[in-house]
Amino acid sequence: MIIADECLDAGITTIIRNAGYEVLSIQERYSGFADIDILDLVKTYRGTLITEDKDFGELVFAYGYKDVSVIFLRYDKEDFSDIVSKVLYVLKGMKKEPTHKFVTITKHKIRVREI
């Protein structure tokens, strides 16, 4: 399951759903949840969080939060379509390799780190 963070552009959530993925939207169901509670949902659902909030990197790497997968997006609005295609590419790969990862996606790069 994909967990769409509250700050994630709604267009990305829609595109991911239309691609056939089951998406739990924090905005729709858990608005106002604290970041740590969102990571607990990711663990509970054994899902992948997609976010534009860099605080999740701090929780995972500085505070050692484990057993989650996070896709962190960094982009400018004009790069939206490039980013969305990279997100779908990464999700397809994560289906085949269901280990815990922190993936950063930018216009020019996809960086994958094992958690």
Image (cartoon, rainbow, N blue to C red):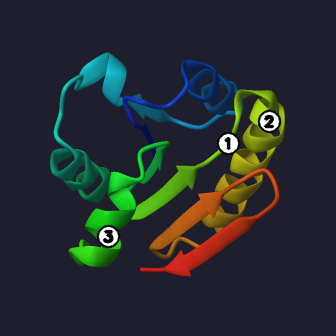
Quadrant assignment for the C terminus: bottom left
Q: Are marks 2 and 3 in contact (CB under 8 Å)?
A: no
Residue 21 on image: x %, y %: 59, 37
> What type is the residue that disc 1 sits on?
Tyr
Q: Which residue appears farthest toward the bottom when viewing the image?
A: 114
> What type is the residue that disc 2 sits on?
Asp
Q: Going 48% across and 33% down the picture, which residue do you hit?
A: 23
Q: Residues within 10 Å of mark 2 (few under 14, many from 20)?
A: few
The residue that disc 1 covers is: 75
Which is more N-terminal, label 3 or label 1?
Answer: 3
Q: Secondary structure at mark 3?
A: helix
Q: Are marks 1 and 2 in contact (CB under 8 Å)?
A: yes
As measured in the structure, the alpha-carbon distance from the residue carrying label 1 to the one carrying label 2 is 6 Å
Q: Is residue 32 above or below residue 40?
A: above
The residue that disc 3 covers is: 60
The residue that disc 2 covers is: 79
- 22 left or right of 108 in image: left
> What type is the residue that disc 3 sits on?
Val
